[in-house]
Structures are given as structure tokens and as C-alpha cells.
Image: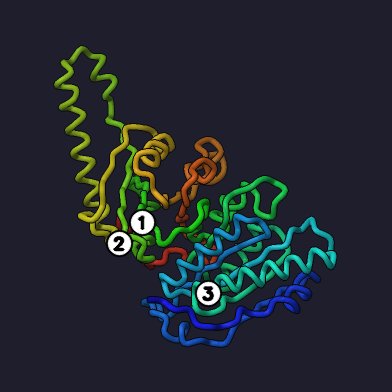
């Protein structure tokens, strides 16, 4: 049975008072036995999880989920507390004291889960910009946020989408109260490089181990409506559709296998619908506690016309959502955005 070490969370008072004056503060505990015994990856460094929080209750959920994932992955955890740019500087003594107390309680909770204290950063400014900058500084492998909220909060409804485009790192949106490790996963897959990257990332994080995972693919049989309207017997139309579905099913199995994932441990689900509707249907059918999908690098007019499935999903779906974006090619962040460190071009 796991027994957390009796270790004090870092004291936040002086750090908080310096941070509210506009300076960046980093609190790092001394290297513990937990950190020295981290399981090393192929690049000889542990996973790094960055959890961004504000004063809202949703941030408590995100922080607890991040702590459980850090323990599961033997990862380093950094907590980034963001201060609303609209708050006055310096903050009032009452607001400062309440925030210090909140941070102290949160760090104590995380310390009990991990058995060691996390690192703490406090920054003031635009949420997406601050998170992207810190994630690059520490080369974070996973970013964890609470649910999207209205405009008057530090994290606004467009923060996750902006972060996906600017940071080029997997983003986990925690919508539900953590009740242990993820058990039921739904992986929304197409046959593009973005989904291959997503599969490799989920596999590298170990999220498929001991879980019930379903791979969902939105697929509409070509010309089925035209064939049906041509007066062809229904049995022939069904046979025509079955042939397409069997071929796509086999293609999916080969695709998943090429991504390095054991397809025999997955349930394959073909949804006859457009992508967003297919995601809604499959979420209703499988009741996952984590939905995972990859994104493509659409920009400009193409993005404006087609929109973003990931953004629609993050707004609508009530379970936790993990989105794996393409790397940011012009930044060193992109080199580490794919935790599996494998080129997507191999599977396309």
C-alpha cells in the first residue's frame, strides 16, 4: 500500500508576496528519494507535468488529477498559479492572505498524494501566454487545466484552444472530480498523422494499461445514398456497405498496429456520422471518463471555414478531454511535443 512521506509542502507566503509585485518566483524542494528513483525515459529525463490553476474550484479538480497522474507516471509536477491581470497591483492584504492560504492547502493536498512537494510558480498575465512560456522553459510533457469558464475568470473559454496552437504540447482538460486512475478511454481516430501521434502519446503515457479503451472512427460509406436511390435491392446495398466497413475496419487495425499499439486490446467502433456527431454518439454509448483526440495544424481561412473539432469537443463534452496537437515546428517546444519521439510521417 502506498504511504506518502511526511514531508511539508513549500511555504508560499514570501513567494506569494514577491509574485504579486510582478516578479516570477520558483519554489523547488530539495531532491527527494521519490525524484531520484524516477523511472527514466529514453532521453534520460522524467516526465514533467505542468498544472495551471487559479482560485476557482475547478482548479482543485485539475490539481488532484495532475497529482494522481504524476504519481502514476513517476513524473515531476509543477503547479503554476496565475493571477488575474485585472486585479490591482499590489493586491489587497485580504486577497493576498486568502490566496496564500488557498495555495498552502492545495500544496499540502498534492504532497499527500505524491509523497513529495511539487514545484510552485506564480505568474501574472494572460493565461495562455503564461502557460505556453512556462511549458517551454521547463519542457513540459503534459499541460493540465480545469474546465473552461466564462470571461471573468483567469482561464477563459478560448484558453485551451490558444494553448494548443501556441505550446504544441498535449493538454488535458479536467471536467470531472478524480475518482482514481482513468478506466474507460475513448480514442477518436482518423487515418491522418495527427491520430497516429495521439495514439503514440497515449501509449507512451501508459494510459492504455489496465483500461477499457475504445477506438472510434467516423466513417460514412461512399455513395451509399446514391446506390440506394438507384433502385438497387436493399440486400445488395447492405452488402455494398458491409464491404466498405470491413475494409475500413481492417485498415484501422493496421493503422493502430503501425502506431505501436496492440489493437487486440482495443474495441473498434465505426460511427456512420460526421466527426462531431460521431464523437457525441460514441461518448453517449461508451460513457468514457477520458476522451482523447489529436488535432491538425489548420490555420487562416481553412481554419475559419472548417472550424476545429477539438475546440467543439472541449466546449461540449462533459468528461475529461486530452488533446494532442501537432508540434510547434518553429520552436524547440515542438521537438518534445510528441512524448513518443517518433515521426508521424511513418504512419500515414
| Label 2 with label 1: CB-CB less than 8 Å | yes
Marks 3,2: beta carbons within 8 A: no
Position of 297 with respect to 272 (left or right) is right
Q: CA distance from mark 3 to mark 1?
A: 23 Å
- Secondary structure of the residue carrying tag 2 is loop
Quadrant for the N terminus, please.
Answer: bottom left
Which residue is labeled 1 in the image? 183
Question: Which mark identifies residue 297?
Answer: none
Q: Nearer the viewer, residue 340 or 123?
A: 123
Q: Tell me how far mark 2 sits from mark 1, CA to CA.
A: 7 Å
Q: Earlier in the sequence, mark 3 or mark 1?
A: 3
Q: How many marks?
A: 3
In the foreground, 31 or 44: 31
Mark 2, residue position: 210
Left-right relation of 285 to 94:
left
Residue 184 percent across, percent down from the top left: 35, 52
Residue at 48% of width from left, 50% of height from top?
297
Q: Is residue 335 visible?
A: no
Quadrant assignment, res 246: top left
**Marks 3 and 2, how far apart at CA:** 24 Å
Q: Which residue is mark 3?
A: 112
Amino acid at each position: 500500500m502506498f504511504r506518502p512521506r511526511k514531508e511539508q509542502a513549500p511555504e508560499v507566503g514570501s513567494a506569494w508576496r514577491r509574485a504579486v509585485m510582478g516578479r516570477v518566483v520558483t519554489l523547488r524542494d530539495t531532491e527527494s528519494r521519490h525524484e531520484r528513483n524516477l523511472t527514466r525515459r529514453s532521453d534520460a529525463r522524467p516526465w514533467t507535468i505542468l498544472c495551471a490553476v487559479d482560485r476557482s474550484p475547478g482548479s482543485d479538480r485539475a490539481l488532484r488529477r495532475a497529482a494522481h497522474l504524476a504519481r502514476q507516471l513517476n513524473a515531476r509536477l509543477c503547479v503554476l498559479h496565475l493571477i488575474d491581470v485585472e486585479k490591482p497591483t499590489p493586491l489587497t492584504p485580504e486577497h493576498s492572505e486568502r490566496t496564500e492560504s488557498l495555495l498552502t492547502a492545495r500544496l499540502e493536498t498534492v504532497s499527500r498524494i505524491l509523497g513529495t512537494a511539487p514545484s510552485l510558480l506564480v505568474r501574472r498575465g494572460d493565461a495562455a501566454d503564461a502557460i505556453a512560456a512556462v511549458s517551454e522553459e521547463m519542457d513540459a510533457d503534459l499541460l493540465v487545466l480545469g474546465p473552461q469558464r466564462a470571461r471573468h475568470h483567469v482561464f477563459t473559454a478560448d484558453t485551451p484552444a490558444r494553448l494548443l496552437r501556441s505550446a504544441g504540447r498535449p493538454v488535458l482538460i479536467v471536467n470531472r472530480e478524480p475518482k482514481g486512475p482513468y478506466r474507460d478511454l475513448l480514442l477518436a481516430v482518423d487515418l491522418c498523422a495527427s491520430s497516429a501521434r495521439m495514439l503514440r502519446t497515449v501509449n507512451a503515457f501508459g494510459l492504455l494499461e489496465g483500461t477499457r479503451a475504445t477506438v472510434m472512427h467516423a466513417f460514412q460509406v461512399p455513395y451509399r445514398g446514391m446506390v440506394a436511390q438507384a433502385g438497387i435491392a436493399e440486400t445488395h446495398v447492405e452488402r455494398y456497405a458491409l464491404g466498405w466497413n470491413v475494409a475500413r475496419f481492417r485498415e484501422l487495425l493496421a493503422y493502430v498496429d503501425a502506431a505501436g499499439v496492440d489493437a487486440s486490446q482495443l474495441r473498434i467502433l465505426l460511427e456512420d456520422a460526421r466527426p462531431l456527431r460521431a464523437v457525441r454518439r460514441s461518448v453517449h454509448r461508451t460513457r468514457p471518463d477520458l476522451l482523447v483526440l489529436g488535432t491538425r495544424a489548420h490555420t487562416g481561412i481553412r481554419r475559419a471555414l472548417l472550424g476545429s473539432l477539438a475546440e467543439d469537443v472541449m466546449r461540449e463534452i462533459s468528461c475529461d478531454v486530452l488533446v494532442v496537437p501537432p508540434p510547434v515546428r518553429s520552436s524547440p517546444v515542438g521537438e518534445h511535443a510528441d512524448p513518443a519521439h517518433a515521426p508521424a510521417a511513418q504512419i500515414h
